[in-house]
């Protein structure tokens, strides 16, 4: 590697937010807490996972979650059902897990087959076992600042910022995307009047005439739209902190698999201007599972409620 290239790599390494390392730290902390909980109380955290249908990406995600549970000493229970399973059958399984004292967290992998209404299933999960933080009660608690389960990707983004010593108070955070899973909860998390937040938050979305009008004003830019490399260097200001939630497959004949993974942010041009940035993969992705484990631990340890 030439000196110029190695200098550039050093510069990039310094400002990369290493989600893989931070997630590994969190998992190690949780493993120690899990050992202690088991030792002190005999409780082993248990996560129940339901996969309906044969979406290959969902299967990969569920397998990663099962593996992550095993690595830190959680029990996991998995049910895999065919795509023609009825909504009533799914609701029956959720009810059974709601009543099972060995199940502390419940996760129904989304998307569900079209004939099942996601919201009916999410609302059937006991709010006390809502490891995904998708239940309306969890969302409501977040909005009004009560303790509760926070959706895993937003919770992971907050941890990434805190553990990278990025100050949030008074900063202008611009969130691109308004999904229930990322955009809405991360905005609500970051404007709360708490020591680790207290930002001024703008949410922009496809309703905006010119998204870059907003993104250029961001001190911290969070992008969660699911469109490959849509935010370019010209859309951000110098020194911005960038959190890229996207995970998109882009055809690439030079790769053995025929595709590469990329975020919603065009990394080469945006990283030139950013003071810190998450890579894809290895940024936000690993944090989501770490926070799922954290939510399940909190449910098992009775840390949430009231
Ligand atoms: N599908 C994609 N991401 C998620 C997630 O975080 N939780 C669930 N339940 N389904 C998903």
Image (spheres, rainbow, N blue to C red):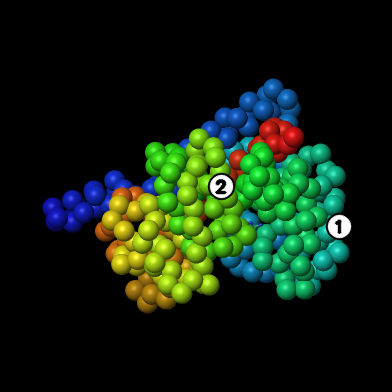
* Quadrant containing the N terminus in the rendered view: bottom left
Q: Quadrant of residue 148?
A: top right
What is the x, y in percent for residue 34?
63, 32
| Residue positioned most to the top | 40
Q: Is residue 86 left or right of residue 201?
A: right
Residue closest to the eye, 119 or 63:
119
Q: Is residue 215 above or below residue 219?
A: below
Q: Residues within 10 Å of mark 1 (few under 14, many from 20)?
A: some
What is the x, y in percent for residue 210?
42, 72
Q: Residues within 10 Å of mark 2 (few under 14, many from 20)?
A: many
Residue at left offset 51%, top offset 67%: 205
What is the x, y in percent for residue 212?
39, 67
Q: Is residue 258 above or below residue 198?
A: below
Q: Which residue is mark 2?
A: 189
Residue closest to the eye, 58 or 121:
121
Label for residue 92? Answer: 1
Label for residue 78? Answer: none
């Amino acid at each position: 590697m030439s000196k110029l290239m190695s200098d550039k790599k050093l510069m990039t390494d310094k400002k990369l937010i290493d989600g893989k390392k931070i997630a590994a730290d969190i998992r190690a902390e949780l493993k120690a807490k899990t050992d202690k909980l088991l030792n002190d109380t005999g409780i082993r955290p248990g996560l129940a996972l339901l996969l309906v249908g044969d979406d290959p990406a969902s299967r990969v995600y569920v397998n990663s979650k099962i593996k992550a549970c095993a690595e830190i000493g959680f029990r996991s229970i998995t049910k895999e059902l065919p795509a023609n399973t009825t909504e009533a059958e799914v609701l029956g399984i959720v009810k059974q897990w709601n009543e099972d004292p060995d199940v502390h967290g419940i996760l129904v992998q989304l998307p569900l087959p079209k004939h099942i209404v996601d919201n009916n299933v999410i609302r059937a999960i006991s709010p006390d076992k809502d490891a995904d933080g998708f239940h309306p009660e969890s969302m409501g608690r977040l909005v009004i600042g009560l303790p509760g389960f926070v959706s895993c990707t937003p919770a992971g983004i907050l941890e990434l910022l805190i553990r990278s010593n990025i100050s949030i108070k008074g900063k202008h955070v611009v969130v691109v995307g308004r999904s229930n899973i990322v955009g809405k909860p991360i905005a609500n998390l970051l404007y709360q009047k708490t020591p680790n937040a207290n930002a001024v938050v703008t949410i922009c979305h496809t309703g905006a005439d010119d998204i870059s009008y907003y993104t250029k004003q961001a001190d911290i830019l969070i992008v969660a739209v699911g469109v490959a490399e849509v935010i370019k260097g010209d859309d951000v200001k110098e020194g911005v902190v960038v959190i890229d939630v996207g995970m998109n497959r882009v055809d690439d004949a030079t790769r053995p698999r025929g595709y590469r993974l990329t975020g919603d942010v065009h990394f080469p041009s945006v990283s030139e201007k950013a003071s810190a940035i998450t890579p894809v993969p290895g940024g936000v992705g690993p944090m989501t599972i770490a926070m799922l484990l954290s939510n399940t631990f909190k449910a098992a340890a009775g840390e949430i409620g009231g």
